[in-house]
Amino acid sequence: MITAKKFVSQALTGKYIGTPYSELDCQALLEKILKDCGEKRDWRGSNHMWRDALSEKHPIANEMNIPAGAWLFTVKNDGGEKERGYNDNEGNAAHVGVYLGFSRVIHSTTGGVQWDDISRARWTHYGLAKCIDYTVPYASEKEIDEYYKSRNTYNLNKGGGDNGTVVPAENPPVYDTPAPLPAIDVDALTEAFRKWVLSFKGV
């Protein structure tokens, strides 16, 4: 088992962004991050992950209650799970990504591995992975509170393609990738990422 801090830090610094979907689909991206953390896993797809890999799962109602390192899912009630051999009431978990905290998500879709925002309608549910320890918080309650106080001045750039970039509500430049993060320890990385997020949140 690995800590959520290690998992998120690997997702942020692993240089996965831009990898084509043909090389890393949504399931393979999570497996790759886990493997790079020393945890080897092999699921049959996002539906298998939804049913087998989680210790708990919930609809997304309030992102403040979702710990960094949680797995985000697009769960549809379209019967698609039956085509994959599942005849239950769990729905069709058609897509999966990683919540990085502070509203940021990494996932792989048709455009390849990219950043996203948890406010996007695609994310309907989240789950806590059995192989990840979430007991050590990724950020303090004060940092989280300060961040969410700043979110009311920002919106999602829905006109910029599928990259899910978060931009200022006025005069919106596009932030396709975060500022480069140095190879530093996890605590320093946490602080660097928090400052990066807040730097374009108007704080």
Image (cartoon, helix red, strand yellow):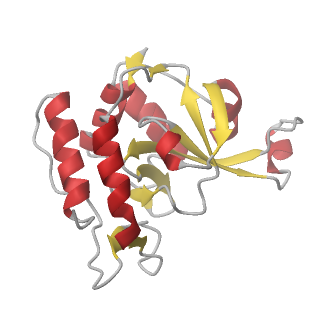
Query: Which corner quadrant holds the C terminus?
Result: bottom left
Which residue does the image show at 26% across and 78% down from the upper left? 173
Image location of residue 164, percent across then percent down: 43, 66
Q: Does the image show residue 22?
A: no
Q: How many marks?
A: 0
User: Between 49 and 69, which is closer to the camera in this rendering?
Assistant: 69
Does residue 141 lie above or below 79 as drawn?
Answer: above
**Horizontally, is 52 left or right of 117 in the view?**
right
User: Between 87 and 201, which is closer to the camera in this rendering?
Assistant: 201
Image location of residue 129, percent across then percent down: 54, 26
Image location of residue 31, percent across then percent down: 47, 32
Give the quarter of the image for residue 187. Answer: top left
User: Between 87 and 102, which is closer to the camera in this rendering?
Assistant: 102
**Horizontally, is 19 left or right of 203 in the view?**
right
Which residue does the image show at 64% across and 52% down from the upper left? 124
Q: Does the image show residue 35?
A: yes
Outermost residue, right side: 87
Outermost residue, bottom side: 171
Give the quarter of the image for residue 90. Answer: top right
Does residue 58 lie above or below 146 as drawn?
Answer: above
**Horizontally, is 201 left or right of 20 in the view?**
left
Which residue does the image show at 23% across and 67% down from the upper left? 202
Give the quarter of the image for residue 161. Answer: bottom left
Image location of residue 28, percent across then percent down: 49, 39
Query: Which corner quadrant holds the N terminus?
Result: top left
User: Between 201 and 7, which is closer to the camera in this rendering?
Assistant: 201
Does residue 113 lie above or below 55 as drawn?
Answer: below
